Amino acid sequence: MLLFANNYDLRSGEPKWWLTKRSLDLPGCEAGGPADVILGDGTPAWVDGGPSGAIPPLDHAVISGEELEFGRLTRIDQPVLSPDDALADDQRAATLHMAGAARVIAPAGSGKTRTMSARLRHLLDDRGVAAESVIAVAYNKRAADELRERAGAPKQTVRTVHSLGWAILRDAYPNLSLLGEADQRRLLDELVHVQHRANTDPMAPYLEALDQVRLGLQSPRWVEDDGDDLEDFAEAFDPYRERLYAAGSVDHAEQIYGAIEVLLRNAALRRKWQRRCRHLLIDEFQDLTPAYVLLLRLLASPRLQVYGVGDDDQVIYGYSGADPRFLTEFDQWFPGATHYALETNYRCPAPVVTAATNLLSWNRVRVDKSIKPGPQARQDPEAFRVMPGISGEMALDAADRIEEWIAAGTDPKDIAVLSRVNASLIPVKAVLVERDIPTHDQLGMKSVQRSMVRALFAWLRMAQDPSEMSATDVREAIRRPGRGLNGVANNTRLPSQLSLEELRDASMQMKARHEAKWLEFCDDIEKVVRASRSGDARKAIGAVLDTAGLISSAQAFDRSGNSTSKPSHEDDLAAIQRAATLHTDLATFEAWLSRAMERPSSTDGVTISSIHRVKGMEWPKVIVFGADAGAIPHRLSDDREEERRIFHVAITRCSDEVVVLADQDRPSPFLNQLTTVAPPPDAAPKRPDRGQVRSRFKQSGKQTSDAVVGDLVSVGGGYQGRIVSRNDDEVLIATESGPKMYFKTHEIVRILEGAAGSGNTGETELGPEDEALFEALRAWRMDRATDAGVPAYVVAGDATMRLIAAARPTTDTELLAIKGIGAAKLENYGDDIIDIVSQFEN
């Protein structure tokens, strides 16, 4: 116990040093002498209760009290062997850290893995620390295997964080098994009411929400309120977990969440694992989520001997809860930590190091650091080039550069092409396939079968032969962009093949308001037909995107997703448009692209990947593809600083040369920052540069800035409570769990209940005409819920219906902007809602 590690026990009236008593239980140690004990060779020794780090020599020998738990009499007053002479001075300083918590800032290419493995060897070999008290946590299995091999450490000493959580859970529940996603979906299907339809995945938001709660430590209610298409989630969360354990299984995220729970509930188990994790070494510290940090703090308590190695400039998984503040504010989590910094980038050429340093200087939430290139770094300015070009020809530029490198002797597997999103690389793979250059990639037929791309190809097929259109293509095209005609199209009898004129004639069976929309759809087909007569795929695709409005529909769906972790529909369409520049023949374009996507990946080929997939990896030659405005920084991201970090990760993957390709008409604003250092920040506290921030939250009635004293509000992190006081910048909230806590005003998520007289009821106010529309929507909702055999709130809650009545959306784009309406709701109910609203508008 920490209490007796620092104090004598006087409860019996006689002072007792418990560590002395424990040492006397070991052979080769006896009582007496001028210190605490006498060792087997007659040496008097003190028994130290502090962390088992080396200390200067004293009047007598000193043995570690920590090591007594493992039956070892380990002296800590003797000179410690120096680690590997190959270490640089900064790496050696970090490796020789004495005791307590330590933060090691390890920028790209600075020898992070070398330092981690040297530290692990140093503890086990040089200091003789018991392997049973050391755990090194690696980011993934590949990194764990590499660290274990480099350090020559026992298998159980190096784990991934999920492996560690799994071991703790299995200690508490020995017969647990690990559940796959298919079984997760089956369990959820028993607890939530969703409507399954072709080409939709209504369970995907629920699976993401489960991770958001458990790895982000967020309230299930807050997650449901903040998301769309998540009815029943908060109520289903606890029963879902109960059914997991009842079935003797857990899923991936539960390995962490469940481990936290059993450690908090079971004191004996907690003490056992804290003993096992007396020394915790954490790799890639910047990628930890709130749940990971909590688990590791529990395991490291009470001494908190955590050796955290990472780089705040490589935090690129913000969507999963990773936060640079876990490193910038390391002392808050692990008080009294010693700080170390690795300062040499041994990987990248000098011009890349300079560009990366300039770029990162524009971020405000970061650890100030000095980074210099290694002594053998390439100095040639040609090692880092930014090459603006014509948008549609950028894939050709990339292929030309790759061919030059290969011709000069570079192996294809030593080349990587990286982009902000994977879909952007579709034209790159297509042209490399055409040139018979092997690729190592994640692109396949699924890449060109997402909903907006399916709709695009349906439009193109209809445009090429309007005399013999497929009814399947008609129904696909009528859904995207949405026109409120899905139900009408499904209920209208269409022949399997029909002409455009026959399609027009079908409108005669319809109500007037549907007939007008149907004929508008036919007019749009005619416009695309005219644009396609030249046989140029570029013109035809442009007509579908702009004239027919598919790009606007894609943007609306993207905005409704609230997450940059998901593929963007607009990125999909932009990639297809760029690919059309490579193969302009409309008649064969779809088949040509499909053949390219079908080619299997080869581990010997050029790596084609999103930036997120390759963090921690390197290649001699790297192309950063598509450094365009809207791509880097990504148009859907609120966090400008994270977008800079993503770009920085991309350019620092190279060991010899990097080329950045950008659209000359829409270059990324970050390109100028590669060559200029940011001006000094003012004296204001550091806050993230979020650029033009787009709210994560949709229309919800009252603005959160209107919150007043007495309002019941929810705030970031899942907390709820009444506002006790507030000023322009922050509020003091009496939380429902008891304590009062300060929050920034921008952290208020929603006003749940207004104070008396405040007017903040949390309910959208409606006029008489809007109330009539609201009642009509409620009546429709009851009919749909009855037909589907689900509760009415599964169709839509009252709050969402009131927002619809107030906003009166008449298009998919407008409907998606309503809080509570996501892609699944739009798919299932959008036509009906727009139809009802249109009746009232007319």
Image (cartoon, rainbow, N blue to C red):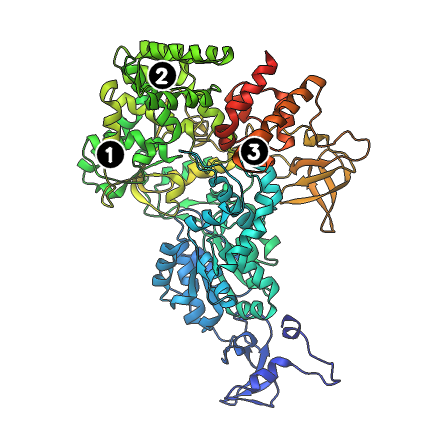
Quadrant assignment, res 198: top left
Q: Earlier in the sequence, mark 3 or mark 2?
A: 2
Which of 773 and 666 lies nearest the eye of the viewer?
A: 773
Q: Which mark is residue 542?
A: 2
Left/right of residue 137 with respect to residue 791 in the rendered view: left
Which amino acid lies under the numbered mark 3 shown in the image of this protein?
Ala
- Against 546, residue 49 (above or below) is below
Counting other residues with Cα less than 10 Å from the Cα at mark 2, is it few (<14), some (14-19), or many (20 or more)?
some
Residue 339 visible in the current orientation = no
- Against 723, residue 770 (above or below) is above
Residue 154 visible in the current orientation = yes
Counting other residues with Cα less than 10 Å from the Cα at mark 1, is it few (<14), some (14-19), or many (20 or more)?
many
Asked if marks 3 and 2 touch (Cβ < 8 Å), the reply is: no
Asked if marks 1 and 2 touch (Cβ < 8 Å), the reply is: no
* Residue identified by numbered label 3: 785
Q: Earlier in the sequence, mark 1 or mark 2?
A: 1
Query: Nearer the viewer's eye, disc 3 or disc 1?
Result: 3
Which amino acid lies under the numbered mark 1 shown in the image of this protein?
Ile
Left/right of residue 596 with respect to residue 309 in the rendered view: left
Point out the image quarter for the N terminus. Answer: bottom right
Q: Position of residue 130 (x, y in %)?
A: 46, 73
